[in-house]
Amino acid sequence: MRERVVLDLSDVTSHASGSASPTWWGTLAFMLIEGTGFALAIVIYLYLMSLAPKWPIATPVPSLTAGTLMTIVLVASLAPNMLVTGWAKKQDLPKVRFGLVVMSLLGIVPLIIRVFEFPAVHVSWDRNAYGSIVWLMLGLHTPHILTDLIETLVLTCLMFTRHADNARRYGDVADNAMYWNFVVATWLPIYACIYWVPRL
Amino acid sequence: MADGAPRKDLRDTALDSAELDRHLTSIWHTRGGLWAAVSTVDHKIIGRRYIITAFVFLFMGGVLSLLMRLQLSQPEARFIGPDRYNQIFTMHGTNMMFLFAVPVMEAMAVYLVPLMVGTRNIAFPRLNAFSYWMFLAGGILLWVAFAIDTGPDVGWFAYVPLAGPQYGTGKRADIWAQMITFTEISALCVAVELVVTIFKQRAPGMSLDRIPLFVWSMLVTSFLVILAMPAIMIASSSLILDRLVGTHFFNPAEGGDVLLWQHLFWFFGHPEVYIIFLPAVGMASTIVATFTGRPVFGYLAMVMALISTGVLAFGLWVHHMFVAGLPRLGESFFTASSMAIAVPAGLQIFCWLATLWMGRPVFKTPLLFVVGFIITFVVGGMTGVMVASVPFDTQVHDTYFVVAHFHYVLIGGAVFPLLGAIYYWFPKITGRMMSETLGRWVFALIFAGFHLTFFPMHILGLAGMPRRVYTYQPELPWSGLNMMVSLSALVLASGFLLFAIDIFRSARNGPAAGSNPWGAATLEWATASPPRCYNFRRMPVVYSGEPLWTEDELQVASGLRVDRRELLVTAVVAATPQARESSVPHSIWPLWAAVATSIVLIWSIFTPWAVVWGSIPVAVALTGWFWPKGAPEEES
Amino acid sequence: MGLFAVCLSGCNGTQSALDVHGASAIHLKHLMLLVIWVCALVWLTVMVVLAYALLRKRRVAAEVNAGADNRATVIVSAAVGATALIIAGLTVASFYTTRLIDGDGDAAMTIAVKGEQWWWRVTYMRDGTPDFETANEIHIPVGRTVLLQLESADVVHSFWVPSLAGKQDLVPGRTNTLALRAETPGVYRGQCAEFCGIQHSHMAMSVIADDAVSFERWLADQSAESLKPAEPEATAGQAVFLGKPCAACHRVRGTPSAGTTGPDLTHVGSRDTIGAGLMERTRGSLAAWIADPQTIKPGNNMPMVPLTSDELRAVSAYMESLK
């Protein structure tokens, strides 16, 4: 088929960020997938609760300390996270490097707290269905913290190499920070479900 | 890049066709040899591979169905014992649903969607490669298990407690559950790629109201995949946890619930059938338009019908549980919603009828299959209305009536359009035409064989024959019909055999096709047959939904680089250009990541520690995947 | 014609949703016929329009003009409207049928049915407490509503006697109910309708509707303890039954046996079939079953107990005598 040039794209930028970036949309899509998974876990919790004569089953309610500490730490980590996002958008390499190191450390702290949350629910996964669903919810969230931490660590290393000063890298940093927001956001309803719903 | 600064890259603007082809080929093409074959990220190569693999699984599943029909041809037959039979019918359903029906639709989209929206590759090309390997691995896992007598034997929906730790002995159900994880990962990845390709990589001017209906159907399908598959992932993981580490999700003695499994499974399972059906609807629309010489009537209505079908699909799942003992009021809601989905389905049928009425039908093989689809799918839709009614369903649930219903909607509603689509797009994919003569015979044998095989099953169900039985008593009046069904299945099988013969012969020496043998309207027909590795020499620009019908020449845009892989990112709604985005080159890392992930998944059938230790190679593979290797595409 | 005859042959029979003798099944058949007719008419209409659309004579070029599209819009909209109306009508008919079935009178008696792999444990209640237990064969009085309480001992099963009523699942951890009322006396066959494992295909049962007098007599006979064996062969058989592992799983009331894993055999000689509807109950089939249950119903939960041919003859005589 014959062709006729009707448009000149020479001056179109070579990498756009935010919603003009495919990886931004890809990150959003994965958030939708994982978010649906979390929502289903909460639905399973509520469903099993509706069937049980007494809830939690044969167990006291979870102790609040570890979970609440986790919530505080995660919410607090949003502040440096937003700063990193802003620096990445401005392509400020020194600040981004610093911010990523901070976020790497901030990613380790919740993992340590998470270790204390499992015993705080006072029931093991194989005791009854309550134990099973509570461990499932904690167990679904933990890998998200872990994978985001590993991604942050990899990105931190990357930003100290020659590949660093590049629009795509800054886009990756911003997408990673967006995913951390998601990790924190999904924790909140799970926290409410595990720690507060049985107290209602 | 500041304006006026000297460019250090090479653009397509000043190049003539031959030079352009040379440059683009050198940066986009996949070399020969094994390494190149397993590290390619070309959506066309991967798509073709995917389609072929899915059809291989179709034929393997078809052999299983012939074995079932052999055993059921006579009462108390002794061809196949109960244990093997239970594996066979489980394998048949599992294979057809997870290894054929969904993957083949995804595969067609992987091949066609980037071409139809006017871009050079699918979004996230390495993820695309990864998803194929995961699909293949899951299929191999399932079939090897079956070959060594460890195939799942609990039905394709694996109800607990039968599939649970107490009654599901051995590793059969675990293999089923983990195979699900493989195929769901694969489908989810493709769904994400398709959404991003369709949203962000369309040709300039291809606003949302100019997208081909097949692309719309794949967009809606992809959202269904994204929202429905987490349910089966959670369900199958919970089942493995119950079986492997002693959780009690489905154990009523410790606060779990048997029906929880059914809710989770069917919350996925009902959208699953629309994941299979909606792409077929898109294929039917494409074929109807091309072979009537006019666009499908009622574009907006068709899009609304697709979207409302997708939304409604999530509100029907309890109709699979009408006899489980749920509260009457709740069940009645699901009767209403299950009936309601007939309305958008009917709307689509009426729009196709209007298109056929007002157009000039050309009776080539693709259109024959679409006509067959309409005839057959409407029967299935009618029996769907029947089973949507709670009281009606109490008599036909779990009988051969339901077996008839779902084969009518799945074979009639999805396989017929798929076969038509193969006849339609085979020339584009291979550069050769299939045989019109053989095509008519294939259609006739499959159409006749299908109805002769499956229509009597409605009667068998009403006459009291339950499903999933490996035999039946001679004193029941089912022998005659069962023998008839079994013999008719041979007719159906012969149609598929002839189809396979046509494929092989045409691929070797079918007549040359040219770029647009059907005179179709959409962008894929503006490329060579088969398309060059870079799809389009210059990015197409469109001004209508039928670009090849409304313009004599292909409008294109210039200014993209030819010294690196580059395509265009455009805005979601109006498709205005936003960026010249690089597209990643070949990589072996998706294969390594798939191998590492497969090891974790298979190992975790046997021990939970696999998730801990196995995640280390996965992390290594993913890091290798993302770590830049200095290619020009990685910097912007 | 042959096809038609073959099809029709499926319409009669003791296990057919179209050969109905129960109050529920009758309502269901009416609904089914209504829906089938309406749907068949709709399908035919669509086919006629399709045929016309494909085959009608038309002018040279395809019609793509505003007039044709406007006309089509009106017609398609009307068709969609008609679809919605028909769907609404069928939904109402469905709800109405549900109301009819639910309103079919209070239950005269309650029978507990427990699904086991791969047979039906039937417990008749008297004043709310279990009276006696039998297996796979349920007698009910004609013309009176009987409530079945459905539970499962292991996996999900489904109780389905199509000539009398729709099916209902037996779900572990739940108690479901199903109301049966036979309008005419007869033997109605049913089968498990939810895949439950290796011998799902051979998990049948029968519901036998007796007139009032026969039913009371049957109830009294079943409720009584087992008959003492009269013949010497049957007496020897009782000794075999009590001495061998049989009594560990099976119970015959009136003897020391107390096994509850397998079906209660107190009146097995009065049942029409054995093996959950697998074989007609004769002395010969009893012997064949006891000799090797695994060949007859492979994978079922009754092990083979080695017996000499004398023992086999004796114990089958004893079983046959338990009327």
Image: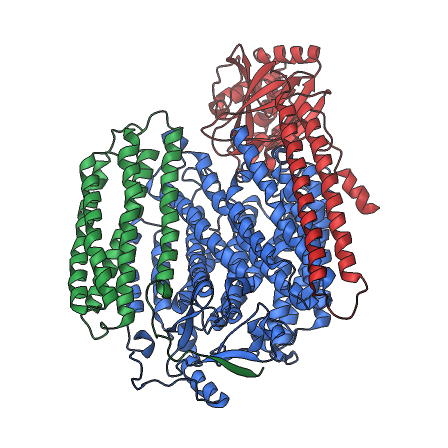
- Seen in the picture, residue C257 relative to C290 is either above or below; the reply is above
- The image shows residue B334 at horizontal and vertical percentages of 55, 37
Q: Is residue C200 visible?
A: no
User: Is C252 on the left or on the right of B373, as rendered?
Assistant: left
Q: How many marks?
A: 0
Determine the residue positioned at 42% across, 60% down.
B192
Determine the residue positioned at 46% across, 49% down.
B228
- The image shows residue B592 at horizontal and vertical percentages of 34, 67
- Seen in the picture, residue C38 relative to B578 is either above or below; the reply is above
User: Is C187 on the left or on the right of B188, as rendered?
Assistant: right
Q: Nearer the viewer, residue C86 or B284?
A: C86
- Seen in the picture, residue A55 relative to B43 is either above or below; the reply is above
* Residue B104 sits in quarter: bottom right
Q: Quadrant of the C terminus of chain B?
A: bottom left
User: Is B83 on the left or on the right of B246, as rendered?
Assistant: right
User: Is B361 on the left or on the right of B90, as rendered?
Assistant: right
Q: Nearer the viewer, residue B376 or C92?
A: C92
Direction right: furthest residue: C1
- Seen in the picture, residue B567 relative to B269 is either above or below; the reply is below
* Residue C193 sits in quarter: top right
- The image shows residue B280 at horizontal and vertical percentages of 59, 58
- The image shows residue B304 at horizontal and vertical percentages of 56, 53
What's the image's color scheme?
A: by chain
Q: Quadrant of the N terminus of chain B?
A: bottom left
- Chain (red): C
In the rendered image of the structure, the colour used to display chain A is: green
In the rendered image of the structure, the colour used to display chain B is: blue
* Residue B167 sits in quarter: top left
Q: Nearer the viewer, residue B389 or B303?
A: B303
Q: Is residue A72 visible?
A: yes
